Image (spheres, rainbow, N blue to C red):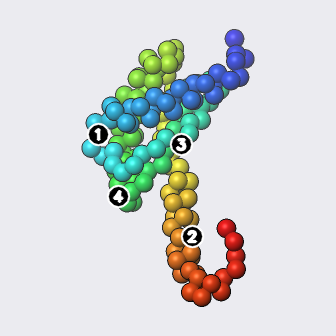
Amino acid sequence: MTGGDPRRAERVAEGIRTEVAMFLRSGAKDPRLQGLVTVTGVEVTRDLRHAKVFVSVLGSDAERAATFEGLKSVAHHLRGTIGRALRLRVAPEIDFRADDSIAQAQRIEELLAQVRADTSPVGEASSDSD
């Protein structure tokens, strides 16, 4: 049986996202996991043997680097946890990837706030509306 349910990979990906998020919130004891770590998405291969877990890490470059080292070291343990929690015959290999979209959005918000502050109406000469 090679076909299977085409949505199964999506359901497994969502389960992995939930399990990883719960693990990071409560079970992660690695001191390298610093900063705010958010699981933003998971992509699973159709055969469910590999999972890319996209995470956003807010913090300094050093904190981000340390966090990814920590994630890499807990990936094997997390694989077993996920396999048991989702009752998978073969748990997928976990590969953590950086998702910079949250950091980029935060930077854009900062820049927009700075522009708004720089162009604040001195004499109400600005006539743009929000």
- The alpha-carbon separation of the residues under discs 1 and 4 comes to 15 Å
Q: Earlier in the sequence, mark 1 or mark 4?
A: 1
Q: Position of residue 89 (x, y in %)?
A: 51, 14
- Mark 2 and mark 1 lie on one chain; the one further toward the N terminus is 1
- Badge 2: few (under 14), some or many (20 or more) residues near its Cα, within 10 Å? few
Under mark 4, the amino acid is: Ala
The residue to which callout 3 is attached is: 40
Between label 4 and label 3, give the one nearer the viewer: 3
C-alpha span from label 2 to label 1: 36 Å
From this viewpoint, is residue 124 visible? Answer: yes
**What is the C-alpha distance between the residues marked 4 and 3?**
21 Å
Quadrant in which the N terminus is drawn: top right
Please state the horizontal and vertical placement of residue 69, each as a whole percent of the image.
36, 46
Which comes before the other along the chain, label 2 or label 4?
4
Q: Secondary structure at mark 2?
A: helix
Image x and y of residue 51, in percent: 54, 33
Residue 112 circle label:
2
Q: Residue at x 45, y 24 (%)?
A: 82
As displayed, is residue 55 above or below residue 19?
A: below
Check disc 3 and give the amino acid type.
Thr
Whether pointer 2 and pointer 4 mark residues with C-beta atoms closer than 8 Å, the reply is no
State the residue position of label 4: 62
Q: CA distance from mark 2 to mark 4?
A: 26 Å
| Secondary structure category for the residue under label 4 | helix
What SS does tag 1 mark? loop
Q: Which residue is mark 1?
A: 30
